[in-house]
Image (cartoon, rainbow, N blue to C red):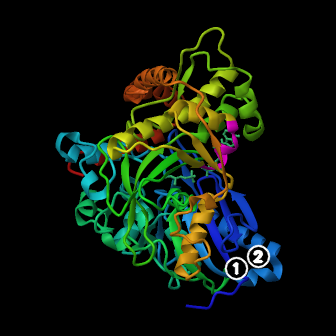
Amino acid sequence: MEKVHKDTLIGVIDAGTRTVKFCVFRPGHTKEIAEHTVDIVTHTPQEGWSEQDPKEILSAVRKCIENVVQQLGLEAINIITLGITNQRETTILWDKTTGEPLYNAIVWNDIRTDSTVDIILAKVPDNNTNYFKNICGLPISPYFSAFKIKWLMHFAPQVKKAIKAETCLFGTVDTWILWNLTGGAKGGKHYTDVTNASRTFLMNIELLTWDPLLLHTFKIPANILPEIKSSSEIYGRVARGFPLENVRISSILGNQQASLVGQRCLKEGQAKNTYRSGCFLLYNTGISKVQSTHGLVTTVAYKFGSKPAVYALEGSVAVAGAAMKWLRDNMGFMGDIQKETESLAQEVFNTGDVYFVPAFKGLYAPYWRKDARGIICGLTAFSTKQHIIRAALEAVCFQTRDILEAMNKDCGIPLTKLHVDGKMTVNSLLMQLQADISGMPVVRAQSQDITALGTAMAAGAAEGIKAWEIYSEERELVPSDTFLPTSTESERDARYTKWKMAVQRSLGWALAKKSSVMTEERYKLLASIPCGLYVIGSFGLIALSEYLSPTS
Ligand SMILES: Nc1ncnc2c1ncn2[C@@H]1O[C@H](COP(=O)(O)OP(=O)(O)O)[C@@H](O)[C@H]1O
Ligand SMILES: O=P(O)(O)OC[C@H](O)CO
């Protein structure tokens, strides 16, 4: 191990759903010294689909590193190591001989794989969503990578071809970046870490290896999968042609696990909630796995080198900040989310009994209902956009309460406070609503970069840099402020009961989808498609019915 110099710096690539960022930390400090962020375009070729260009992600990584290196000037030479943190579950398949993606990245919140879920459900006794939970910790849901891989294997001919030729590789976003940074087709390292692997639906959560039964169920060949490593070890060096050539890469963490580390929730019983597009609450259960019976998932929290893996219970919420984007972009309720959400919601004192369930793509934890769809209920002639914006903020808090209720039931020991981070937490009204709806103090981290910080800490640990005292019990090292509940228990419970009524009304909505396809869309198509395409359409239907047959 190289001697650590006092000017040592650690770089972090944070490849999120909406943005890619590169930032640099000085060991022991919680605030980054330089950063650059680039937005990533998400394509929606069909309703419910969500794709990104893997090459755009890579070029954003390059641009961000180049920009920060330029900002730091000569100091950049002190960056001795890099960490990678990433949006999880997002699935990329590429050709290892050319380095070319075989399809766009299918993003974690894409729901095209609903039919794949039905195929897998049809194979298990009683259509039991939790049938494989003992093996991989996860319920059957379009969220996880295996369903996306299976979809690609069926619907993308180029994927079929590459699998047959044994040139296809699979990776989540961490693996795609690592493989390319370490040489790509010329010897790139095809690794992932345990936290990302635990989100694929293919890893045995006990053994931390790819599980043969799951691979067989999905008919996924083992030779496309990366090797599973710990979250903190030296994986390789940046290859020639990339900025920061020869610098070691020494941590990989899924972004929600990274913020658990950054929040220093390193002891059993500590939890954090990160509010971004989605919202993810992770509860550290130590080296023992807790199997949830209330709709949470069991996931790997982190594994530092050869130390035992630490587990977490996770409550994943698909739509949190994304609902604000929808109110801005689709409803035109505001122009600037950051500047206007809080002030508009504060123009009213409550939601006027309006409830908003933003189940745009079904509901994740604790419901796991892909047939749910968004609803706004309780509208009256007095309802205004301000009420709806406030209801959207409350929806984030109610969804968090759903998770907290499930966690308390699974763990037995209720949380006494909630540590929070993520861009949405700048909204102080949201923080107060969260304290009032959950009835517990909400402790807000004063840094926006908790995810990157956790990744830097893990990279530092692999390099023997102990500056953050990662195993210290002193959580107060993360500067924070606290919001205390101002509601009574009966007020809280009355409102929560109403929320549950609203959730009930959102369930099952998508089951009626078929009838709408047979009416509007069909007739729109009949009016516009030249006759040759009917033939392609019927071939498509035959392919789809074969795919959906229980034997496939
Ligand atoms: N002041 C605010 N109040 C409410 N929501 C906000 C506020 N600022 C940002 N948001 C929401 O938070 C989310 C920020 O997401 P971001 O950190 O960019 O991560 P990602 O989209 O990668 O999850 C966006 O969905 C945005 O709508
Ligand atoms: O990039 P974010 O913050 O939307 O995180 C997405 C999660 O990792 C999905 O599981």
Farthest top residue in view = 381
Say if 406 sits above or below 445 in the image.
Answer: above
Q: Dividing the image into 4 quarters, which one contains the N terminus?
A: bottom right
- Label 2: how many residues lie within 10 Å, few (<14), some (14-19) or many (20+)? many
| Image position of 29 (left or right of 489) | right
| Image position of 41 (left or right of 48) | right
Q: Which residues are magenta?
A: 421-428
Q: Nearer the viewer, residue 178 or 426?
A: 426
Q: Position of residue 231 (x, y in %)?
A: 47, 71
Q: Position of residue 367 (x, y in %)?
A: 38, 36
In the picture of the structure, the residue carrying the numbered disc 1 is 243
Q: Position of residue 99 (x, y in %)?
A: 53, 74
Q: Of label 1 and label 2, which has the lower sequence position?
A: 2
Q: Amino acid at mark 2?
A: Val
Q: Respond yes or no on whether mark 2 lies under 8 Å from ligand 1.
A: no
Say if 172 sits above or below 141 in the image.
Answer: below
SS class of the residue under badge 2?
helix
**Which mark identifies residue 196?**
none
In the picture of the structure, the residue carrying the numbered disc 2 is 69
Structural distance between the alpha carbons of marks 1 and 2 = 8 Å
Most frequent secondary structure within the magenta stretch: helix
Farthest bottom residue in view = 2
